[in-house]
Amino acid sequence: MAFDGLMVGISGVRGRVGEAFTPEVACQFAAAFGAFSLRRSSSKAIVLGRDSRVSGPMFHHAVVAALQSVGARIIDIGMAPTPTVQLAVEHHHAAGGLAITASHNPVEWNALKFIGSSGLFLDAAEGAEMRQYLESGTPRAAWDALGEVVPDTSAVERHIAAVLALPFVEVEKIKARRLIVALDCCHGAGVVIMPRILEQLGCDVRSINLEPHGRFHRPPEPVAENLGELEALVRATGADVGFATDPDVDRLAVVSEKGKAIGEDWTLALATQVVLARTPGPVVTNLSTSRVLDDVAGRYGSRVIRAPVGEVNVATRMRTERAVVGGEGNGGVILPDLHLGRDAPLAAALILQLLEETGGTLSAVVASYPRYEIVKDKLDRPEASLDSVYDALRAAFPDADVDTQDGLRLSWPDRWVHVRPSGTEPIVRVIAEGPTEADARDLVRRCRMPLDALVR
C-alpha cells in the first residue's frame, strides 16, 4: 500500500498535516498497530498519549476510534512525554503504546510512534510485521467487542517518582544546593513534567514558553542555534544551568551558567559521568555521537559501543551488551535502571546530580575534557541510491576506518564523518567532528561534493 509523502520508519510514521498525514492515514496505521499488538499479547490494553501540537486533539480522536475498532482497551494518559508513555506501557503490562508526536519536526508535522509491550519502540522486523496488516486488511471487532477508553491521570507523577527513586539521584543533596534552573519547554509536552520534577529537586525554576498550545514560535529542535532565548534567560537570572526540551520530551539540551548552549552531545556525556562513577560498564550510543563520550568512558575504564542512529537501535543494543547507560548525541539519555528509552526528565536530574557532586560550574566540568567541534549539515534526499556516494567517499578517504551499519561513517583517531539518509525527514544528514570547526567543516564539504553532484 502506497502512502505518498509519508516518512515511514522502523517504529513510526510521520508527515505534514493535511497533506500526507491525515486522520484517515492515522486511523489505518493505528488500527493496524492495535491489531498487531493484541495478536502478540494476552493484554488488550494500549496506552495512548500525545504532545501539545495543534493537530494533536484531532489525531487523538482518530486514533481512539481506530483502536476501539480493533477491540483495544485504551489507557489514555492525555498530553504527556513520549518516555511517560513508554513507562506507562510497562506499568500497565499493556500490549503496546502509541505516542502522537512528531518529536522535533516543525509545527506542520505530526506522527505516530509505535511502542511494543516491552516499552521499546518497534524494531525493523516488528514494524514490517505490523505493516502487513495495512496490506492484507486489519481485522475489526464486532459491535459487542469494541474497546473502551480508560483515563490514567497518574502517569506523569509515576514518571517523576521513578526518576527521583533512582540510586544515581541524591534528592536531598540536590535540594541543598538550591540551584537556579532556567527552563524552555517550547510550548511542548515538557510543560506537564519538567517544572514539577525540577521543583521537587528544590530548584528555583525560571521558565519561558510554558503554554502548551503547540504553536512553536521557533524551530522546536533543541539545538544550539534555536536556544537564544534560553541563553538570554540564563544570563538575566544568574541561573546555574539552562534546560530545553523538544516537544515530546525525550531530548534535553543544556545551557551553561555563562549563558552558552554547550551542544546537545554534552547531555549524554555529562549524564554518563554520573552513572559510570557508580557503575562502570559498557556504554552504547549511535554513530553520530561526539567522541567526548569516549573520553568520559575512558576515565572510568569503560568502552563505547556504537549502533545505527535511532532510539530503538541503541536501546536493543544496550540490552544485548548489558550497557549501564547509553543514548544518542541529540540530547537523548537512556538509563536501563529506569527504562530503555530516551528521557529528558532523567537527563535533567542526572545533570543536577553532577552539579551537586562537583560543587562547581557546568563550564568547569566541560573544560575538564578535550574539546571537539561538531558540524551538522543536511540536504534534500536524492531519488537515486546513495551507494555511488558511499563508494566515492571510501575511495576519497582510503585511510579511514569504515562503518556501514547506517549509511557510511568514516573515522580517524581525532575526527569522524557520518553520511546517512534521515529516517524522520526527506533529507540526507552529513555530520562531522574534528579538533577544530575548520577540520569538521572541511570533512562536511568534501563529503557533500558527490552528494551535490547526485542531487543535480
Image (spheres, helix red, strand yellow):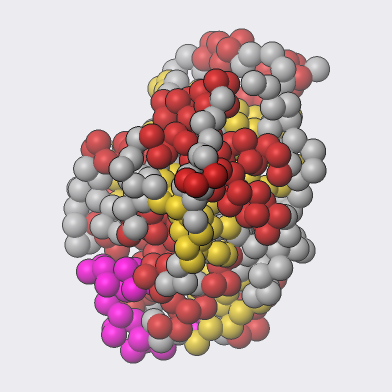
Viewer-proximal residue among 14 and 74: 74
Q: Is residue 192 in view from this perspective?
A: yes
In the displayed structure, would residue 56 be above or below residue 105?
below
Q: Is residue 158 left or right of residue 35?
A: left
Residue at the image position 68 percent from the left and 32 percent from the top: 6
Q: Quadrant of residue 443?
A: top right
In the displayed structure, would residue 346 be above or below residue 330?
below
Q: What count of labels does the image hold?
A: 0
Residue at the image position 40 percent from the left and 83 percent from the top: 200
The magenta segment: 160-181
How far from the left and from the top, in percent, is residue 224?
62, 57
Q: Quadrant of the N terminus?
A: top right
In the displayed structure, would residue 202 be above or below residue 114?
below
Determine if the magenta segment contains residue 73.
no
Q: Is residue 12 left or right of residue 399?
A: right
Residue at the image position 58 percent from the left and 52 percent from the top: 64
Q: Is residue 389 in view from this perspective?
A: no
How far from the left and from the top, in percent, is residue 327?
40, 48
Q: Quadrant of the C terminus?
A: top right
Viewer-proximal residue among 419 and 215: 215
Determine if the magenta segment contains residue 179.
yes
How far from the left and from the top, in percent, is residue 316?
33, 38
How far from the left and from the top, in percent, is residue 178?
41, 88
Residue at the image position 64 percent from the left and 41 percent from the top: 26
